Image (spheres, rainbow, N blue to C red):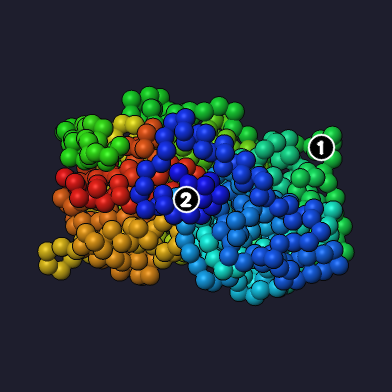
Amino acid sequence: MSRDDLHEPEDRVDKQATGLPRAPGLFQRLRSRIRRKDVERRTVDLDSIAQWPASVSVLERDEFGPLVIGISDATVFPDGSVTSNGGWFVSKRFGLRPHLSDATDIVHSDVPTAFVLSVHPTRLNIVTSIGPNLVTLGKSHPGIATIFPDVSEKPHHPITSLASTCGVTMGGFAITRGSARRMASAVFARLSSTDISDNQVAQFAETMRAATAPTSASVYLEHNTSDGSPNDPSMVDFRFDHESSGSRLVPVNLLSVEGIARAVSGASSVTVESSELLPFSQFAAPTASVATVDKTLRAKRAPSRVTSTRRFDMDKALREGLPLPRGVEVISRPGYDIRDTSVDAHRVFYRGAWGPQHTYVLREHSLGPWLISVTNAVVSPNGSVALDDGTLLAGLYFGAPRNQIPVDGWITTELSGRAGLAITAMRGFGHGLLHVAPRVDALNRFDAELPILVSHGWWDDSVLLNAAGLDDAHTIRVPHEQMHHLVRVPELIVSTQLFPEVNTGRADPQWLTEFVNRLSPVPAGEPSRRVYFARDDASGIRGGCANRYELDRIATEFGYETVIPEALSFTDQIRLASETVDMFGEQGSALTWSMFMPPQSRLVSVQSKPDGHQNRHMTYHNPVLAARNSRFDLIGAVRAGKHLGFEVDPRALRRAMEQLP
């Protein structure tokens, strides 16, 4: 071991990337301690020194000092640390952090890139820190590629579309654990801070207001959890009072920063449910009045408020023939076909070897959906159904959310006649294909003139609904943003879901087959396509696999045809699935199309959970593909550590594909 191995982490990292073994045990730990002390001796605090090193330059100033800086020949690590020419830099003002962990892969680039080395991008931090930082970068370096070293959000990431509004582009969330970026010039903007100036925050608010149009004169900013249930049930009546007086209710936790900005933009009056939400009021008119709700007061309970007080398990009642609550009646009961359909053909790649999938046997197959009538039903925007007496009809098989969200809100819509229910708590494409469309199909076959309640989706689901038999004239959209806005239906017709029951593997091959045949055209000739279902976002910045390029490379290597379903029309996607006998891709909504493959096909899915995850076998593909007499191969080749979505180990994935049964 040379002295250079201790002084130059970049050189040491590059050697590790070539495959040289690491020093194990005590020697490795001793080496790490020596290196950390050496790093501390060579670390410069840019906030406290009078003259910066030659490798650091000021690109823009304001009245408070350096606003944007550049560091030449810089290597940026996933922990937010930066080194250049053998020296490390720290700065609270610019988000540069002490060096804690190295990387095994270094990506070299000659393109100047901006870095936002801030806290995790929660909505509040985007408003107070990340957004102002992006605007500063956009004004000083329009269009510059920007990278975030750590991301805690889920696939619908709020920063992706926010970047263009702020004048920058996304460089990809390429700095994940185990990787680093080295470039000729790294750019950093000063983080907004009250002890420096509020000017950056003000510029961000002005930028967001300019990009949106005023929507309401009075706005009430409310807390809501991500699933829509109120954080504080006592606040429901406060919300009702403000909405009754003309305020627009804005659920902060259910909208992106851009969505909040659009809702608040131009408002002359803003009421926030707590002081924690005050930063979001900046998007209102500059002269707007802002007030915080006084929680010591108690509003009079709204006469139309409904709160669920007890839970009734519909799944168990339907399976075992138990008495149902008053007002709930089964109007269509499917028959049963008792047979064994083993999923023993399924395989899972786990800890470097292929093994059998959990043995689920699909013994009891219903021959169609249950249809249930509920008198005077109260429907929540997440799909929950309650009776007048507060009883919550719960159960995934029945169609309620998995965690059985209590109904708590007031009746805002009264329907005059019978309606069907096809609302799902999750609104992604895969959920629409598996949860919503089959229920619409069942309800439409029961009564073609029945109006049906459906959610506002993340995507335009009108083509899917039309294909399932629901036209716009019979569609009743229930907004998801206001989870305490309830709909009362004199008679609600509910279909059970096609989604298989949790932990039992019970599926419905006949209903599934009939549904697929109604939506899917008969392919011309013998289906033979082997398709890799890629994503339009090749960089992985919208979630999923962070090193997606490895999937692309391996799919091509093993002879798969690469297709991006997002680039195809809905009809073409159905046709593609019906012609595919071997589908490969990362776990996600697109693989739901596997249910439209011909019988005796194969799905190879790269899972998004690390090895050893307790739910690595629990996926709807098991019974759905078994019901189609198709095969399911699940590959667990995920690198350990925290990544955006997940990061695949290419060597393990290639080994799994080579040994595929």
Q: Is residue 418 left or right of residue 578?
A: right
Residue 87 location, x and y as percent? Answer: 63, 55
- Name the disc covering residue 295, or none: 1
Residue 613 location, x and y as percent? Answer: 39, 35
Question: How dense is the environment of label 2, judged by Cα within 10 Å: few (below 14), some, or many (20 and up)?
Answer: some
The answer to which quarter of the image holds residue 362 is top left
Question: How dense is the environment of label 1, judged by Cα within 10 Å: few (below 14), some, or many (20 and up)?
Answer: few
Asked if the residue at tag 2 contacts the one at tag 1, i.e. Cβ–Cβ closer than 8 Å, the answer is no
Instruction: Determine the secondary structure under disc 2.
Output: helix
Residue 583 location, x and y as percent? Answer: 25, 56
Instruction: Determine the secondary structure under disc 1.
Output: loop
Quadrant of image for the C terminus: top left
- Residue drawn at x 62%, y 46% is 39
Spatial separation of the CA atoms under disc 1 and disc 2: 57 Å
Comes first in the chain, label 1 or label 2: 2
Query: What type is the residue that disc 2 sits on?
Result: Arg
Vertical position of residue 184 compared to residue 322: above or below: below
> Foreground residue, 372 or 225?
225
Foreground disc of the pair 1, 2: 2
Reading the image, the residue beneath label 2 is 12
Query: What type is the residue that disc 1 sits on?
Result: Lys
- Residue drawn at x 56%, y 69% is 184
Q: Looking at the image, can residue 171 be seen?
A: yes
The answer to which quarter of the image holds residue 263 is bottom right
- Residue drawn at x 30%, y 50% is 651
Quadrant of image for the N terminus: top left
